[in-house]
Amino acid sequence: MKSQYIQQAQKILVLSDRIDPRVYSDVCKERFHDVDFIVSCGDLPEYYLDFVVSNLNVPLFFVHGNHDPSGSKQSLAGGVNLDEKVVYFQGLLLAGLEGSVWYNGGIHQYSQRAMYFKYLKMVPCLKWKKLKYGRSIDILVTHAPPAGLHEGDDLPHKGFYAFTLINKKYAPHYHFHGHTHLYDHKQSRRDSLCETTVINAYGFQVVEIGETT
Ligand SMILES: [Zn+2]
C-alpha cells in the first residue's frame, strides 16, 4: 500500500486560476491557520501569492500557467518553482510540470511532444527518488489537466498525455492541476485516474494527506 510512505498528516492549501475572496480576505489567517504548505497550480498574480504566504507563513510550491501574469519568473512570492523538478519536503515527494497545450505560441505553452520531453528530463531524478525513498512521486503538480480527465473541448484546454502516463506509471497519491475553469457545481473537480486522485484546484481546495490516504 502506498499509504505506508506518508509519515505525517499534512494539510495543503491548493490555489489556481482565480483569486478567491475566501482566501484573499481579512480572515485568511484564521481560516487556514492549520495549513502546512501552499501549492499554486498557476495563472495567479504574485501579489495574491505574496498575500497568502505572508498571512500563513508557510512554504509555497508552484508551477506557472499559460496566462501567468508573472511571465517566466523563476520564483514567485519566495516560493519553489516545481517545473521539471522532484522536491522532497516534509516526507512528501512533489513533482511539477508547468504550462498548457500549445495554441498561439505564448509563454508556458507546449506541444504534446514537448511536454513528453520535459517529462523525460525528469526521469533520472524520478529513478533516483525511487531508489532513495521507495517511490518517485506523492503529489504531481501541473497547470493543465491530464489527457482524458477534466479537460475542455477546445485546443487550449486539452490535457497532456504525458500527465496521464505519469499517473499510470508512478501512481502518485494526488495530481493537483488548474486551467479548467469551473462554472457550476455539476462539473466534477475530484476524480480517480488509476490509483491517483486528480483534483482541479480552480479557486482553492484544502487537501488533507496522511491520515486517510
Ligand atoms: Zn490556464
Image (tube, rainbow, N blue to C red):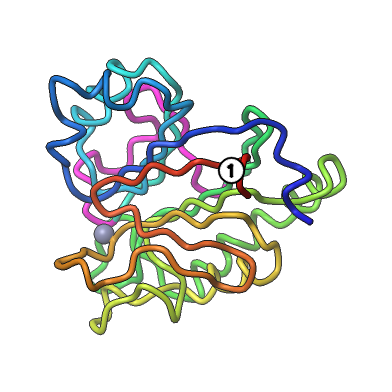
Circle 1 sits in a helix, a strand or a loop, which is it? Answer: strand
Q: What is the count of numbered marks?
A: 1
The kind of residue on which mark 1 rests is Leu
Residue plotted at (64% across, 67% down):
195
Residue beneath label 1, please? 94
Q: Position of residue 171 (x, y in %)?
A: 67, 63
Along the line of sight, which residue is nearer the eye, 99 or 60?
Answer: 60
Along the line of sight, which residue is nearer the eye, 106 or 146?
Answer: 146
Q: Is residue 108 above or below residue 58?
A: below
Residue plotted at (23% across, 24% down):
28
Q: Quadrant of ligand 1?
A: bottom left
Q: Going by the image, does 89 lie left or right of 183? A: right
Residue plotted at (28% across, 16% down):
55
* Mark 1 closeness class: few <14, some 14–19, many ≥20 residues within 10 Å: many
Q: Position of residue 134 (x, y in %)?
A: 84, 47
Q: Position of residue 82 (x, y in %)?
A: 50, 42
In magenta, the rendered stretch is 66-84
Magenta residues, dominant SS class: loop
Residue plotted at (85% across, 40% down):
132
- Which image quadrant for residue 60? top left
Q: Is residue 131 above or below residue 190?
A: above
Residue 120 part of the magenta-drawn span: no
Q: Position of residue 206 (x, y in %)?
A: 38, 42
Q: Is residue 57 above or below residue 132?
A: above
